[in-house]
Image: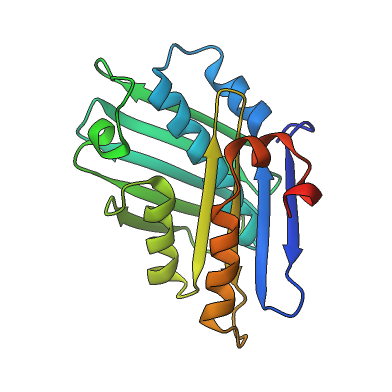
Amino acid sequence: MSVQDQLHRYLFENVAVRVELVNVSHTWQEIIKNHDYPAPVQTLLGELLVATSLLTAILKFYGDITVQLRGDGLLSLAVINGNNRQELRGVARVKGEILADSTLKSMVGTGYLVITISPEKGERYQGVVGLEGETLASCLEGYFMRSKQLPTRLFIRTNEKGAAGILLQVLPMQDTQPEDFNHLATLTETVKSEVLIDLPATDVL
């Protein structure tokens, strides 16, 4: 990850919830600048970058993680690879004209999300997630509930300048009340893209 990008980790006081706050705007610009991707594909790559960075932040291991979308639509592949050092790279494969108002499902078609974790030591793990949600964030939230069984919310924001995101997750083995977590999620939902992308992390919090 570029020094211009930032990852911050926090714990909320008196509530057993952690927050990961990431800005990958510079890395995103580097990935898309040499490719003539349609705007919706650029946005989706930014979302995948944010998601991959957040996943590498909360998975305590040394190695790589790959998050990829595959489908039978005009966007047949979109993939981001990252590691525990927050070094990120990615690419997309487009095979037709993608309209400016295209959604995740209209671009990917019938497809799925694949998360591959490759630790330097130990077994390689792969999880496959159906595209049941309308957004990448909602699909990943479903993955966390099934695989980790921890309440998790992702808030991904993009605009023409950058890409950033926030992950909220209940700490394992902690007694956190659902209303406390939902309250934090409701507050986080109000954070607009220009705030999350442009302001320092402390101001966002």
Toward which corner of the image does residue 36 lie, by quadrant? top left
Task: Give the left or right position of residue 28, taking residue 199 as reference.
Answer: left
**Does residue 119 appear in this view?**
no
Task: Give the left or right position of residue 65, taking residue 61 as reference.
Answer: left
Q: Using the image, determine if residue 114 lies above or below residue 23.
A: below
In the rendered image, residue 12, in percent from the top left (x then y), is placed at 73, 70
In the rendered image, residue 127, in percent from the top left (x then y), is placed at 38, 58
Q: Residue at x 75, y 39 (%)?
A: 199
In the rendered image, residue 159, in percent from the top left (x then y), is placed at 55, 29
Q: Quadrant of the N terminus?
A: top right
Q: Nearer the viewer, residue 37 or 81?
A: 37
Q: Residue at x 61, y 29 (%)?
A: 162
Q: Residue at x 45, y 65 (%)?
A: 144
Q: Nearer the viewer, residue 57 or 20?
A: 20
Q: Nearer the viewer, residue 93 or 23?
A: 23
Q: Quadrant of the C terminus?
A: bottom right
Q: Nearer the viewer, residue 83 or 140?
A: 140
Task: Give the left or right position of residue 205, taking residue 101 as reference.
Answer: right
Q: Residue at x 59, y 79 (%)?
A: 172
Toward which corner of the image does residue 27 lie, by quadrant? top right
**Does residue 77 appear in this view?**
yes
